[in-house]
Amino acid sequence: MEGFDTKLIHGHGYYDEDRGYFIPPIYMGTICEHPDRETGQPRMTERGTELKYAREENVTVEALESAIARIEDAADALGYASGMGAISSLLISILRPGMRVVVPMEEYGTTIRLLEELRKFGVTVDQVWPDTEHVIDALSKPADIVFLETMTNPTLRVLDVRQISRAARDAGAKLIVDNTFVTPYLYRPLADGAHAVVHSATKYLAGHNDVLAGVSAFPDQESARAAWEWRRMLGSTMSAFSAYLVLRGLKSLSIRMERESASAMAIAEFLREHPAVKVVHYPGLSDSPYREVADRLFERRLYGAVVSFELKGGKEAVLRALKRVRVIKPSPSLGGTESLLTYAAMSASGPIAPEVRERLGITDGLLRLSVGLEDVEDLIEDLDAALRDRRVGSDRRPAPHGGVATRRGPSPRGPRTAAPPAPRAIPLCTPRLSPPRAPPPRTCSPRRS
Ligand SMILES: Cc1ncc(COP(=O)(O)O)c(C=O)c1O
C-alpha cells in the first residue's frame, strides 16, 4: 500500500512510454486526432470518456485528477477552473426543483450567495447555526443535500463531519464537504461517507498563490460521471496550465501543511498572550472548544494553518494592523507560501446579516491570518510590531463566540527591540517589491542610464 507522500509525488501516473518522460507536460492543444487513423475509433481516457477536445478531457488535467483521486482514496476526481467552478457545477448537477439544502450559515460567502441564487430554480436552502448539533437537528426534516466546510471561515469552528455524515445518510441526504481549509493531508471526508469532497485548489493543494483552480472527488464512478457531464455542459473545466501548476504544488502539500500548521500553532499561542488581542480562534489551542473534535477527525494532530483573532481596538485597530504589516501581506486569500492577513468582516462573510455576523464572532475587530512558509520568528515579530499601540488597553475579557480569551500579562517575548524592515526602493519601470510609502509614479519613463 502506498503512503500519502508517495501518492502526492507519483499519483498522477503519467508516463510517456515512447520517450521516457514521467513528469506530466502541459498539453496546450485543445484538440487531438479524432478518430485514431489506425483504428477509426476515438482515443479513450481511463474513465471511459473520449479524448478529443479540451473542454471535456485534457491529458495534463487527467494527470492531476488521477493524483487527487489517489490522495482522496476516491474512485475519480475532476478538475475545474476554480473552487467556485467545482462547487457550482457539482450543486447544479445534483439539484432539482423542490430539493432542500442544509448549509451552516458561516461558510465561504460566494458559496452562500450561490445557494441563495439557486432558490430561483425552486430549491429550498436552510441556513443553520454552524455547529454539529444544529446541522444534525436540521436533518430531522427531509433533506437532499448537506453542504459543509470541515472548518468554518473565518472563526474556524470544526464540525463533526463523521457524525453529520451518519445523520445525512439516515435522512437520505447527500453530504458534500468543502475541505479547502483542512486538506486531505489532515482529513478525508470520503472515508466518513461523504458523497463528494470539493476544494478550492487555489489554496493549499496548489499552495503558491499563483493559480486559480478547483477539484472535486467522488467515492463512486457514477457520481463522478454525472458531475463530468455537467462540467462539460457548463464549461467549467480546468486549463492544462493550471493543472500543471496544481500538480507541481501538490507534491509538497504534506511538508507545507506540517510546517505551516506548526507555525500557526506558535502564532496562535503568541497572540493569546498579546495585550492587543481579545480572542484567538484556533482549533489546536489546548482550551479551544473545537480541539476535541479536531483531535478525533484530524489524524495527524495538526490543526491547519489559519488563525483568526479579534483585536480590542475594533475596526480602527484592524486597519492600522493591515497598514503596518510588512512580511505578512494584507490580502483576501489563504493557503499559499506567503502569509496573508484578511479583514474578515469585509471579505469572507459578505452575505451574512451584520447582527448575525456579530453573534458568530465575525466582529469588526476580527482578522484572519493564513500562515505561510516564512520563518515563524519573522511572522511573530511582524505581528507584534503591527499590533502594538499605546491606545490599546491591556484589560482582558472572557472570550465570547467560543474563541479562546487572551491571558493576563505581557507578551512572553518581551518588548520588541528591532525596527520593522524598511520598504525597499521602488525602481522605475519595474514591478513594486514592497508597499510604497508615497503613491507610485503615474507614468513610466525610460531610464537614463
Ligand atoms: C472554503 C472556500 N471554498 C471555496 C472557495 C472558492 O474558491 P476559488 O476562489 O478557487 O473559486 C474559497 C475561496 O476563498 C474558499 O475559501
Image (cartoon, rainbow, N blue to C red):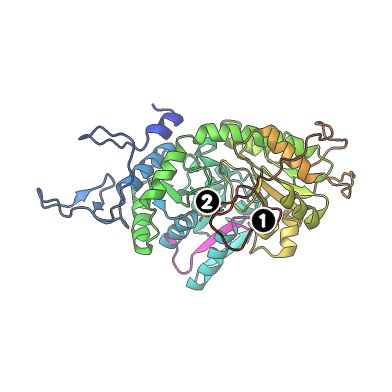
Residue, x 44% and y 57% (percent of image)? Answer: 90
Residue in front for this viewpoint, 276 or 186: 276
| Disc 1 Cβ-to-ligand 1 distance below 8 Å | no
Residue 264: image location, x then y, percent: 66, 37
Looking at the rendered structure, the kind of residue marked 1 is Trp
For this view, does 12 lie left or right of residue 53? right
Q: Which element is circle 2 on?
A: helix
Q: Which element is circle 1 on?
A: loop
Q: Residues within 10 Å of mark 1 (few under 14, many from 20)?
A: some
Compared to residue 55, the image places residue 327 above or below, namely above
Residue, x 39% and y 41% (percent of image)? Answer: 69
Compared to residue 183, the image places residue 312 above or below, namely below
For this view, does 417 lie left or right of residue 110? right
Looking at the rendered structure, the kind of residue marked 2 is Ala
Q: Quadrant of the N terminus?
A: top left
Residue, x 28% and y 53% (percent of image)? Answer: 29
Q: Measure how far apart labels 1 and 2 are at the Cα level.
A: 16 Å
Residue in front for this viewpoint, 423 or 133: 423
Residue 268 seen in the current view: no
Q: Is residue 418 magenta?
A: no
Compared to residue 267, the image places residue 242 above or below, namely below
Q: Which residue is mark 2?
A: 168
Q: Is mark 1 in CB contact (under 8 Å) with mark 2?
A: no
Residue 90 seen in the current view: yes
Q: Is residue 106 magenta?
A: yes
Compared to residue 69, the image places residue 140 above or below, namely below
Give the residues in magenta: 94-108
Pointer 1 or 2: first along the chain: 1
Residue 129 marker: 1
Residue 332: image location, x then y, percent: 61, 53
